[in-house]
């Protein structure tokens, strides 16, 4: 049903393969547009966004340890550290 396509990256200008499996995944998720960046450029872009994000330190409401979050903490809701948050699921 799907065939591999060669697309051109809008950031680096290089060609990359949009595989049949990726196309099927996009269709299952309901994505309308094909990717415009190669894997390396997508990864670099995500890392740049992550690196520019300002992190805030607060106290975990459950264990009392340090919790680092990507938003400015307010006192209206309890904030959990990564470990307590993972255990609460």
Image (tube, helix red, strand yellow):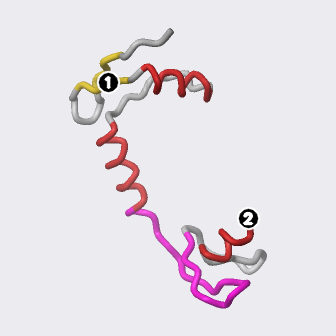
Assign the C terminus to one quadrant of the image. bottom right
Disc 2: CA contacts within 10 A as few (<14), some (14-19) or many (>=20): few
Residue lying at the far right of the rendered structure: 76
Q: Are marks 1 and 2 in contact (CB under 8 Å)?
A: no
In the rendered image, residue 34, in percent from the top left (x then y), is placed at 45, 23
Q: Is label 1 in a helix, a strand or a loop?
A: strand
* Residue drawn at point x = 65 percent, y = 69 percent: 86
In the rendered image, residue 66, in percent from the top left (x then y), is placed at 57, 86
What label does residue 31 carry, if any?
none
In-front residue for pair 43/86: 86
In the rendered image, residue 44, in percent from the top left (x then y), is placed at 32, 49
Where are the magenta residues, as a range?
Answer: 51-69
Residue on which the image places disc 2: 89
Residue on which the image places disc 1: 17
Left or right of 2? Residue 67 is right
In-front residue for pair 32/76: 32
Q: Quadrant of residue 79?
A: bottom right
**Whole-Å distance between the Cαs marked 1 and 2?**
37 Å
Q: Is label 2 in a helix, a strand or a loop?
A: loop
Q: Quadrant of residue 12?
A: top left
* Residue drawn at point x = 32 percent, y = 24 percent: 17
* Residue 37 magenta: no
In the rendered image, residue 2, in percent from the top left (x then y), is placed at 47, 12
* Residue 57 magenta: yes
Q: Earlier in the sequence, mark 1 or mark 2?
A: 1
* Residue drawn at point x = 63 percent, y = 86 percent: 59
Residue lying at the far top of the rendered structure: 1
Left or right of 53? Residue 8 is left
Q: Quadrant of residue 39?
A: top left
């Amino acid at each position: 049903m799907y065939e591999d396509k060669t697309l051109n990256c809008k950031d680096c200008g290089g060609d990359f393969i949009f595989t049949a499996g990726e196309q099927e995944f996009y269709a299952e998720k309901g994505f309308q547009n094909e990717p415009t960046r190669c894997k390396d450029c997508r990864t670099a872009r995500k890392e740049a966004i992550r690196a520019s994000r300002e992190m805030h330190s607060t106290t975990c409401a459950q264990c009392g340890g340090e919790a680092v979050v990507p938003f400015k903490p307010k006192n209206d809701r309890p904030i959990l550290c990564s470990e307590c948050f993972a255990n609460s699921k």
